[in-house]
C-alpha cells in the first residue's frame, strides 16, 4: 500500500471515528455542537468532516420532528455555500427532501408546480424569481432565498403550500391577510413586504431578505442569553409589535421562531397574521384558537378574543425563554395548557437565575400576568416598560466611568446606593455632588443629581429666593440630608433613559452653581 493510500485510509477512519462520537453524543441527548468537533482540524480535512457532521445533525433533527433549514447552517459555517449545504439536506435519509436537486437555470412551468416537490424550486426560476436555497418551512408554506431578476437583489420568497394538494378560500384569505398586514408596516424591527401575488394559482409573498437566524435557533444554540442581550432583543421585538398595534394590527403568533436576529444583533418580527387555527382536544372549549399553544395567553383558552395584550403575553414568554433557555412548560395538550394558565403562575426568573435583578423579574411577571388588568394593554406600554428596565440594568458606576473617563477634575466614591463626586473648582475651591436613584417602580425611577450649599437657615430664605432665579441648570431647593434641612441645587432625569453626557453636564453645572450659592449665602467653602 502506497503512503498516500495509507494516509487516505487513516483519514477516513479518523473521520468515521469523529462522526461515531458525534452520533453517540446525539443519541445520549448531550446536544453536541458541531464547532467543538472541528477544533484543531486542518482546513481541507475540516470541510470533509464538517459535511459529515452536518448530515448527521440534519438527520437527527428531522428524526426529532424539528425543521432544520439551510440558512441555520449557512450562518454558522460560511466556509460552505448555501448550495453545498442544501445538497446535504437533499441526501438526508429521513427528511422530506429526498430527491436530488438540480441547480440549473431551467424555468419551471407553472402547471408543473403542483406535481413536483417544493424543494425542487431550489436552483430554478419561478416567474422573475431565481430560487437559491430554502430558508425555512412552516404550516402555510416554504420560504426561499431568491434573486429578483429585474431588480437584481435578494429577497425572501414565501410560497403558499396547498393543504392536501388543494387550496381553499379561507386558507388563501389567511395568506393574503399576512401580506396585507405586513405591507402596512414599515419599521426597522419588522420584516418588510415588497409584493404579494398569484401566478397560475401559485400564491406568493416577496419579503425583505433578512440574513441571520431565528431567535429560537439562537436560544437553541446558546441557551440562556446574557441579561442585557435578552432585554435588548425583547425591547426590539416590543418596538416592532408597538408599531403594529399603533396601526391596529395584532400579530397573534408571537414566538421566537417568528423573530429573525441579524448578524448585527437586530431583531425583526415576521409572519404577521400567520396565526394557526387549532381545535381543542376537549369538547368543553368548543372554540377555534389562534396562535401557537405554548405561547397563547390564558384568556384565549377561556373563549376571549385575541387582543394586543395577548401579543404582550407571548412577548413575555419569549423574554422568559431568552433568560432561562426554555419555556416554563412544554405541554402538547390544549387542555393541560388551559388548566395551567388558569391555576399556575409562571416561575420567578430569579428563582432559576438568582443573579437577575428584581426589576427584570417584575418585568417578566407583568408581561405574563394572567389577569388582563395587570398586564400591559399593548406593545406600546410593554415597550416603555422594557426600555425602562433595560436602562436601569446599566449601573450608575458604568455611566459615571463613561461620563468622566477623561476628566481629571472629578473623583468619586460610593456610599451605599449613593455616589459622591468631588469637583475641583477654580480658586482652590471644591464642591461635592451626589448621584442616587429614587426607590420607585421601574417606569417611575428618577436619577437625582444634587449638591448641598449650606444649612437651610431661615435667615438665608430671602437671599436664597433671590438667588434661585439665576440657577440655570436644575433648581435651588430645600432637602433633608441625613435628617437635616439643607439648601441644595438639584436636577432629575428618568433613570431608564439618562445618558452619560447628561450626567457629565449636570454634575459640572450643579457643582459650579451650588458653589456660587454657597459663596453668596455664607462667604465660605464648606462643601
Image (tube, rainbow, N blue to C red):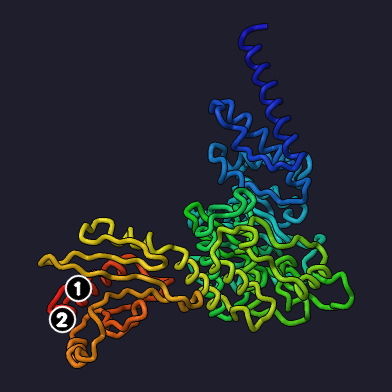
Label 2–label 1 contact, CB within 8 A: yes
In the image, which disc is placed on residue 189? none
Residue 251 visible, this orientation: no
Q: 324 or 400: nearer the eye?
A: 400
Q: CA distance from mark 2 to mark 1?
A: 9 Å
Please report the residue visible at 65 percent of the width from the left and 66 percent of the height from the top.
348
Q: Secondary structure at mark 2?
A: helix
Residue 405, located in which quarter of the rendered image? bottom left
Residue 366 percent coordinates (x, y): 61, 74
Residue 52 visible, this orientation: yes
Residue 407 percent coordinates (x, y): 23, 58
State left or right for residue 313 relative to residue 463: right
Q: Which residue is mark 1?
A: 526
Residue 526 percent coordinates (x, y): 19, 73
Q: Which residue is mark 2?
A: 522
Please report the residue visible at 34 percent of the width from the left and 70 percent of the height from the top.
435
Please report the residue visible at 69 percent of the width from the left and 55 percent of the height from the top.
137
Please tell me how crowded label 2 is: few (under 14), some (14-19), or many (20+) other residues with Cα within 10 Å: some
Residue 304 percent coordinates (x, y): 74, 82
Amino acid at each position: 500500500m502506497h503512503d498516500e493510500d495509507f494516509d487516505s485510509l487513516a483519514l477516513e477512519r479518523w473521520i468515521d471515528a469523529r462522526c461515531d462520537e458525534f452520533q453517540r453524543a446525539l443519541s445520549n441527548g448531550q446536544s453536541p455542537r458541531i464547532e467543538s468537533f472541528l477544533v484543531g482540524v486542518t482546513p481541507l480535512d475540516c470541510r470533509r468532516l464538517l459535511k459529515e457532521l452536518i448530515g448527521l445533525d440534519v438527520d437527527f433533527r428531522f428524526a426529532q420532528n424539528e425543521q432544520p433549514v439551510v440558512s441555520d447552517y449557512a450562518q454558522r459555517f460560511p466556509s460552505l455555500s448555501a448550495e453545498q449545504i442544501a445538497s446535504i439536506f437533499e441526501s438526508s435519509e429521513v427528511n422530506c427532501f429526498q430527491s436530488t436537486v438540480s441547480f440549473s437555470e431551467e424555468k419551471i412551468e407553472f402547471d408543473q408546480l403542483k406535481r413536483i416537490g417544493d424543494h425542487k424550486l431550489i436552483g430554478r426560476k419561478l416567474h422573475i424569481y431565481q430560487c437559491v436555497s430554502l430558508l425555512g418551512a412552516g404550516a402555510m408554506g416554504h420560504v426561499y432565498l431568491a434573486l429578483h431578476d429585474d431588480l437584481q437583489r435578494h429577497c425572501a420568497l414565501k410560497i403558499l403550500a396547498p393543504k392536501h394538494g388543494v387550496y381553499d378560500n379561507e386558507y388563501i384569505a389567511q395568506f393574503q391577510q399576512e401580506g396585507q398586514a405586513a405591507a402596512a408596516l414599515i419599521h426597522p424591527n419588522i420584516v418588510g413586504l415588497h409584493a404579494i401575488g398569484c401566478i397560475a394559482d401559485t400564491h406568493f409573498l416577496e419579503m425583505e431578505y433578512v440574513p441571520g437566524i431565528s431567535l429560537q435557533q439562537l436560544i437553541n444554540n446558546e441557551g440562556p442569553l446574557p441579561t442585557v442581550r435578552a432585554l435588548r432583543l425583547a425591547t426590539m421585538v416590543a418596538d416592532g409589535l408597538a408599531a403594529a398595534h399603533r396601526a391596529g394590527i395584532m400579530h397573534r403568533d408571537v414566538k421566537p421562531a417568528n423573530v429573525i436576529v441579524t448578524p448585527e444583533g437586530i431583531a425583526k418580527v415576521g409572519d404577521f397574521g400567520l396565526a394557526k387555527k387549532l381545535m381543542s382536544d376537549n369538547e368543553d372549549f368548543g372554540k377555534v384558537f389562534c396562535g401557537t399553544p405554548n405561547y397563547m395567553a390564558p384568556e384565549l383558552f377561556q373563549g376571549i378574543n385575541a387582543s394586543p395584550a395577548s401579543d404582550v403575553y407571548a412577548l413575555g414568554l419569549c423574554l422568559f425563554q431568552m433568560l432561562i433557555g426554555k419555556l416554563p412548560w412544554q405541554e402538547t395538550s390544549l387542555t393541560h395548557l388551559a388548566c395551567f394558565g388558569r391555576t399556575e403562575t409562571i416561575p420567578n426568573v430569579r428563582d432559576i437565575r438568582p443573579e437577575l435583578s428584581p426589576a427584570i423579574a417584575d418585568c417578566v411577571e407583568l408581561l405574563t400576568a394572567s389577569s388582563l388588568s395587570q398586564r400591559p394593554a399593548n406593545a406600546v406600554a410593554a415597550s416603555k416598560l422594557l426600555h425602562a428596565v433595560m436602562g436601569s440594568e446599566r449601573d450608575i458606576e458604568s455611566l459615571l466611568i463613561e461620563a468622566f473617563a477623561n476628566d481629571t477634575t472629578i473623583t468619586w466614591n460610593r456610599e451605599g446606593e449613593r455616589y459622591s463626586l468631588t469637583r475641583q473648582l477654580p480658586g482652590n475651591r471644591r464642591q461635592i455632588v451626589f448621584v442616587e436613584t429614587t426607590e420607585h417602580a421601574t417606569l417611575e425611577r428618577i436619577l437625582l443629581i444634587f449638591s448641598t450649599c449650606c444649612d437651610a437657615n431661615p435667615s438665608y430664605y430671602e437671599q436664597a429666593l433671590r438667588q434661585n432665579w439665576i440657577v440655570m441648570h436644575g433648581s435651588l431647593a430645600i432637602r433633608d440630608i441625613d435628617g437635616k434641612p439643607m439648601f441644595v441645587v438639584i436636577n432629575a432625569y428618568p433613570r431608564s433613559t439618562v445618558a452619560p453626557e447628561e450626567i457629565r453636564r449636570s454634575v459640572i453645572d450643579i457643582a459650579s452653581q451650588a458653589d456660587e450659592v454657597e459663596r453668596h449665602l455664607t462667604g465660605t467653602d464648606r462643601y
